[in-house]
Image (cartoon, helix red, strand yellow):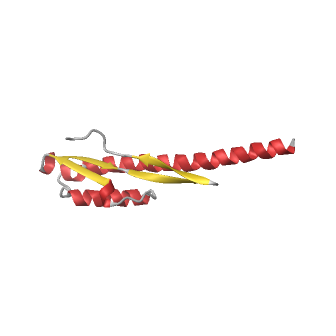
């Protein structure tokens, strides 16, 4: 009887640990995608409040937002595509990365590709 309880508790703890790590990776990805949507909207530039950002500025901003969510991105993992120019330009942002989930006795990776939605071209 004590062995069954111990095994049951051990399995439950393992499931909670794995679940927590997966959910935290998924949540960070969703938050990064929301941040990317905000960056791509360029709301301040559309109303004339700030100058439109360059592709490199947007890339660095995505990397900075990712770091806030404990996601490490290299510049080559962030794609910036633009259509139009000036106030009427549309921006598509995408990232491609993996997150390592460490488990007792092993690990596995989750692959994420957050983007701002529909590719512009």
The structure residue drawn at horizontal position 28% and vertical position 57%, both measured from the top left corner, is 59
Q: Residue furthest front?
A: 106
Residue farthest top in this picture: 118
Residue at the right extreme, as displayed: 1
Q: Position of residue 20 (x, y in %)?
A: 58, 48
Q: Residue furthest left?
A: 85
Taking the image as shown, residue 19 lies to the left or right of residue 27, namely right
Q: Is residue 33 left or right of residue 10?
A: left
Q: Nearer the viewer, residue 62 or 11?
A: 11
Quarter of the figure with the N terminus: top right
Residue 83 at least partly seen: yes
Quadrant in which the C terminus appears? top left
**Is residue 103 among the parts visible in the rendering?**
no
Q: Position of residue 30 (x, y in %)?
A: 42, 46
In the image shown, does 35 or 2 lie closer to the viewer?
A: 2
Which residue is painted at 46% across and 50% down in the image? 28
């Amino acid at each position: 009887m004590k062995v069954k309880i111990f095994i049951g508790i051990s399995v439950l703890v393992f499931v909670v640990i794995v679940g927590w790590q997966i959910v935290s990776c998924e949540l960070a990805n969703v938050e990064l995608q929301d941040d990317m949507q905000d960056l791509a909207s360029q709301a301040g530039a559309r109303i004339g409040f700030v100058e439109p950002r360059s592709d490199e500025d947007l890339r660095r901003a995505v990397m900075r937002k990712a770091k806030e969510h404990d996601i490490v991105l290299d510049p080559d993992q962030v794609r910036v595509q633009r259509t139009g120019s000036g106030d009427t330009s549309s921006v598509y942002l995408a990232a491609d990365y993996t997150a390592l989930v460490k488990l007792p006795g092993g690990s596995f990776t989750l692959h994420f590709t957050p983007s701002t939605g529909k590719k512009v071209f």
